Amino acid sequence: MTTYFIIEILVFSGIILFLIILSGTFSGSETALTATSPSRIHRLAREGNKRAKVIEKLIGDTETLIGAILLGNNLVNILASALATAFFIRIFGEIGVVYATGVMTVIILVFADVLPKTYAISNPERVSLKAAPFVKLVVLLFAPIMTLVQYIVRATLKMFGIDIVGQKLFSAHDEIRGAISFQAHEGGLIKYNKDMLDSILDLQDVQLEDVMVHRKNVEMINADDNSDDIFAQLVNSPHTRLPLWREDPDNIIGVIHAKEVLRAIKANGGSAKNIDFTKIAHDPWFVPETTSLQEQLALFLAKNSHFALVVDEYGDFMGVTTLEDILEEIVGEIYDEHDTSSEEIEPLKNGSVIVRGDTAIRDLNRQFNWNLSDEHVTTIAGHVIDIAETIPLPGQRFTQTSTTPGFTFEVLKRRRNQITSILIIPDTAGPDK
């Protein structure tokens, strides 16, 4: 073996080794940049980390980023394989092609693919920050080529009726929901916190008609009553704000606040006589029942108000909603010293549940991890009526098998056409006792 041949072996080996390291850098960078958390990178960028700012720009155009890395990776892998094949042919002749294929497959798979990707997936943030300047250079070098490649890819897909221009792969809400679900599954979130975070994301999908206090349950004041009766009603009411109507309950002319009444009585020498409650009432604020909770929350904050009257598309009064109603959708029922617990949900020892008919399906799903559909109806009574396709009588039972678990619903009480109490028996419930 001559000195020239030894030098040739060393040169070829050195070049191939360099190309393998370069290929591993491409593979690791691709995995790290796609696995790293955009929120963490954004936080680091806002704190002044220059490399994080580079990464933020790179992942802003994922198509170009991945394309440039894949192009560079393929170039070095093909070049390394070609050099190895030429070298093995010189040593072993035609059979060298087989040797080169086997050796390079193992080397590229282990050292240029699996190893760097395994490390990168374990340390995505660290690897992506280290690789940021290198990847930025690669993207700048291959940007013109990637523009042509992207045009060819999009044109080819368009021939098959697939247009990817302007499509979003995922929404921020979907990504957050996925993260919450994953953390809950892995034990990183307790159920209450998961439910609360899910409820925040649901605010844009839930409308006021789903959470408002229905008009039949709204306490209101007749403006034509005498002042002493109005004051007595205000004192006995657990609410601080009450709608004021005249002639017809649908004709709401204002909203009385208990504090304003106390101020007026103090100014009147401590007496409610001859106080004109219409003058101290605030103007009514009407909002459509189709307003989302997210929109209404923003309106409450903008108007510095806690109380609104809900109307349908014809302007008819449907109910009232408060800031507390929206907050309760997030954190659950809020009771103060003047509230009375409704006991609308009563779990039984065998796993069955007795609920009021106007109990929200979302509350049941949240409390018991059920998956009852609330797409068409919002209350459990509405759900039973939807299944029965009529207003059932007390004692009637209806079975639903389209969900897991399945359910049996028994109507316990009914007042006129309103179902007031229901027994829910999941398939997982034990025998009645």
Image (cartoon, rainbow, N blue to C red):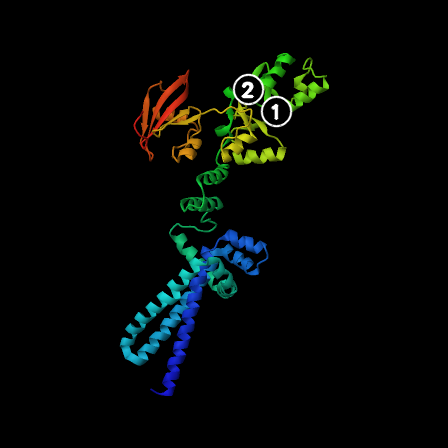
**Most distant residue in the bottom direction:** 2
Q: Position of residue 231 (x, y in %)?
A: 63, 16
Q: Residue at x 32, y 80 (%)?
A: 90
What is the secondary structure assignment of the residue under circle 1?
loop
Q: Residue at x 44, y 31 (%)?
A: 363
* In this rendering, position of residue 223 left or right of residue 328: right
Q: Residues within 10 Å of mark 2 (few under 14, many from 20)?
A: some
Residue at figure coordinates x 44%, y 69% from the top left: 22
Whole-percent x and y of residue 367?
Answer: 42, 33
Find residue 399 and report its image quarter.
Answer: top left
Q: Nearer the viewer, mark 1 or mark 2?
A: 2
Of callouts 1 and 2, the N-terminal one: 2
Q: Which mark is residue 167?
A: none
- Which amino acid type is shown beneath numbered disc 1? Pro
* Residue 328 pos. (x, y %): 51, 32
> What is the crowding at mark 1: few (fewer than 14 residues within 10 Å), some, or many (at least 20)?
some
Question: On the rendered structure, is 296 left or right of 280?
Answer: left
Residue 168, image x and y in percent? Answer: 46, 48
Q: Amino acid at mark 2?
A: Glu
- For label 2, the residue is 219
Q: Quadrant of the N terminus?
A: bottom left
Asked whether 314 or 177 is in front, the reply is: 177
Q: Nearer the viewer, residue 82 or 216?
A: 216
Q: Would residue 172 be seen by someone viewing this image from the given angle? A: yes
Q: Which residue is mark 1?
A: 284
User: Can residue 149 be seen by looking at this rendering?
Assistant: no
Badge count: 2
Q: Helix, strand or loop at disc 2?
A: loop
Q: Is residue 192 above or below residue 344?
A: below
**Where the C terminus falls, by quadrant?**
top left
